[in-house]
Image (spheres, helix red, strand yellow):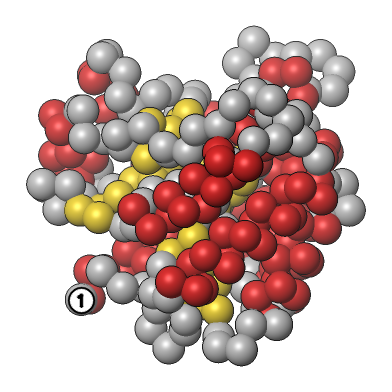
Amino acid sequence: MAFDGEARCTIALGWDCEMIGDYHEGEIPVKTHGRLDEKVIEYTRRIASVAAEAGVPMQFYILGMSLEEDVALWHDLIAQGHAVDQHTYDHFRLNHQDTANVIEQVRITSELFKEKLGFYPAGLRGPGGYRNGLDDCPEIYPHLLETGIEFVSSQYATSGPSSRYDLAADKNAYMGIKHMQPRRYASGLLEIPITGYSDRHFFDTMGRDLNGWIEHLQRCIDFAYDIGGLLYSPALHPDTHARHDPGIETIEAILAYAARKHEPVRFCTHRDIAAQVMAS
Ligand SMILES: [Zn+2]
């Protein structure tokens, strides 16, 4: 599968809209993942607007739980040209052995999408990410397809130490992009792997800083661009970025960096990639 089209390489920025508990300001609800605080809602609006003004569509994943609250934000993102798909109801792992719960969470969330946003989601981000994607749980493929899920983004195989900096791990993080390209499971379900470091991994696990983060994204873009025809698709989180990048430097830097390349770099959503694969 090639995702270049007219461009040298493709970048799909995927944002998982959720809250990890200790990012919550004030009283922490029992289940925090889908209950976004005002700071994160505002940050999500800002990143969506910055990208939309640059003509760049992004992919957002939301929890079913978030659709039980004010849904104006999600309508606004869609109106700006961004794609919104699901991330289960309350952040339940797709490779959990309680398959019945996995299927029910996806089903309930798809119904909430239909009721609150007017459409069924075509995409599903796997909470937590899994080294083998969904290779280890083929029993859920037919159920996902029945629910209208056409693609998942669940594979995350970037490993890194907890120390601040490791040259070999950093190199592996971007070189792995070559082996982590969209692929189909036996059933036809599409996997769009998560590549490079996730922001959680970089900032929260490894404790690294914003300059290092932007540099990492630039190295990933360089690699996808230099090899050519590759998709670079990192997992990002508005709550992590709101804390570590309050000035929205990452998106601005990435857009400017991609624009400086000689050949065009394409930005798209995971939905765009799925549509391209289906048509090919
Ligand atoms: Zn998540």
The residue labelled by disc 1 is 280
- Identify which residue, 80 or 57, lies in the foreground: 57
Q: Is residue 138 left or right of residue 116?
A: left
- Identify which residue, 221 or 22, lies in the foreground: 221
Establish if 139 lies above or below 251.
above
Residue 58 in view in this figure: no
- Residue ID at (52%, 52%): 174
Percent of width and height locating residue 100: 23, 19
Establish if 253 lies above or below 280.
above
- Residue ID at (59%, 26%): 161
- Residue ID at (70%, 66%): 254
| Residue type, mark 1 in image | Ser
Establish if 81 lies above or below 20.
below
**The residue tagged with tag 1: helix, strand or loop?**
loop
- Identify which residue, 117 or 46, lies in the foreground: 46
Residue 216 in view in this figure: yes
Percent of width and height locating residue 10: 48, 71
Establish if 255 lies above or below 166.
below
| Quarter occupied by the C terminus | bottom left
Percent of width and height locating residue 53: 74, 76
Percent of width and height locating residue 65: 54, 29
Residue 34: name its quadrant.
Answer: top right
| Quarter occupied by the N terminus | bottom left
Residue that lies at the very extreme toward the left in this rendered image: 186
- Residue ID at (60%, 16%): 31
Q: Is residue 175 left or right of residue 30?
A: left
